[in-house]
Amino acid sequence: MRKIWWKIACVCLLVYTFIAGILLDVPHVPALQETIRNLYFHVCMWFAMMILFSVSLYNAIMYLRHFDLKYDVNARQYAAVGIVFGMLGYGTGAIWMSYTWADPNNPAFQSFSAIAREPKLIGAAIGLLVYFAYMVLRDSINDMDKRARISSVYNIFAYAMLFPSIWIIPRILPSLHPGQEGNPALNTSDIDGRMRLIFYPAVIGWTLLGVWITTLKIRLKLLNDKKILS
Amino acid sequence: MKRLKQLLLAITGLFITFMAQAQDVKKVEMADMMRSNGRIYVVVAVMLTILAGLILYIVRLDRKISKLENGN
C-alpha cells in the first residue's frame, strides 16, 4: 500500500461521520425530523459523484492533449465509480423522499405520481443515463486508440450534459427537493453550523473512499493490460 | 445612573419576550426515545460493523493488488 496517509484519513473521516452523524444533535425540522441525518450520506453521494466525474473529465482532456492511453484508463475507471456513487445517491434519495415527500393524506398511488413528476429525479436519471451510454459506447469499439479518442470526446459532452440535467432544469421547474434557490446543503438556510461540522468531513471521507476504489480498479486494469501485452 | 437602570430593565424585558416567543415554537417530534434508552448505540454499532467490514475488504484487495504489482 503506497501513500497510506490519505487512506487512513478516509477511514477516520468515515468513522467520524458514522458516529457523529448519528449521535450529535441536529436541528429540529418538521417533516424531516431525524431523517435530516441523511444529509451526511445521501448528499455526500452526489458530491462524490460530481468530483469523480470531474476527475474523469480532466483525464479525458489530458488524453486528448497527450494521446497517452494511461489517461484513458483513468477516465474510464473514475467515470465507472462515479456512476456507482450516482446510483447510490439516486437509491438513497428514493428511499428518503418516499418517507418525507409522500402525503400521508393521499392514497399511496396518487402521491407516487406526484413524486415521479419530480424534475430533480428525472434530471438525475438523465444525467446517469448519459454516463451509461458512455460505457456502452466505449465497450462497443474494439480498436484501442479509436475507443480512447471517441470516448474522451463523449466524456466531455457527458459532463456538459450534467449541468442542464441536474443543476439547471430542476432549479427552473417547481420541485419538492430543497435548495431550489441556491445550492442544496451549501447555503446557510439549509443547514446550520452543527451539521456543517459533520457534513464537510463526510463529503471528503466519501470522496476519498471513491478515489480509493478507483485507484484499485485502475491498478488492476493496468496489471491486466500488462498481462495481455507480455 | 437612573437612565442606565431603565435601559437595562428595557433590555431585560425584551429578552424575556424573546424567550417566551422561542418557547412557543411547536416542538418537533424527534427520536428521543431511542436516545433516552440508549438503543441508538445499537444502530451506531451495526453501522460501524458494516463500515469496518467494507474497509477491511478494500484494504485486503489493496494488499493483494500490491503483491501482484511487485510480483511482475
Image (spheres, rainbow, N blue to C red):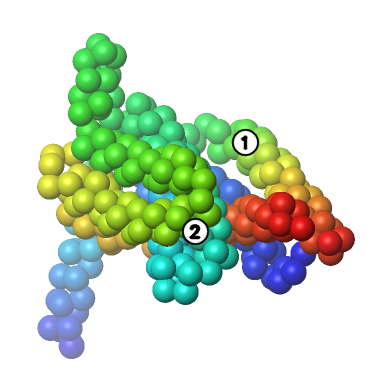
Read off the residue under disc 1. B43
> Which of pointers 1 and 2 indicates the residue nearer the eye?
2
Q: Residue furthest bottom?
A: B1
The answer for which chain carries disc 2 is A
* Element type where label 1 sits in the image: helix
Q: Position of residue A188 (x, y in %)?
A: 28, 61
Q: Secondary structure at mark 2?
A: helix
Mark 2, residue position? A145
Name the residue located 28 percent from the left edge and 24 percent from the top edge: A102
Instruction: Residue at 45% x, 71% y: name it.
Output: A62
- Tell me if I can see residue B21 in this picture: no
Position of the N terminus of chain A, as image quadrant, is bottom right
**Label 1 – label 2 distance at C-alpha:** 50 Å
Asked whether A23 or A56 is in front, the reply is A56
Instruction: For the residues labelled 1 and 2, say whether their Cβ atoms are less than 8 Å apart.
Output: no
Q: Which residue is painted at 29% across and 39% down in the image?
A: A126
- Residue A45 placement (x, y as % from top left): 46, 48
Q: Is the residue marked by circle 1 packed among few (<14), some (14-19), or many (20+) residues within 10 Å?
A: some
The chain letter for the residue carrying disc 1 is: B
Q: Type of residue at label 2?
A: Asp
In this rendering, position of residue A199 left or right of residue A169: right
The three-letter code of the residue at mark 1 reads Val
A161 w.r.t. A106: above or below: below
Do pointers 1 and 2 mark residues of a single chain? no
Note whether A88 is above or below A226 in the view shown: above
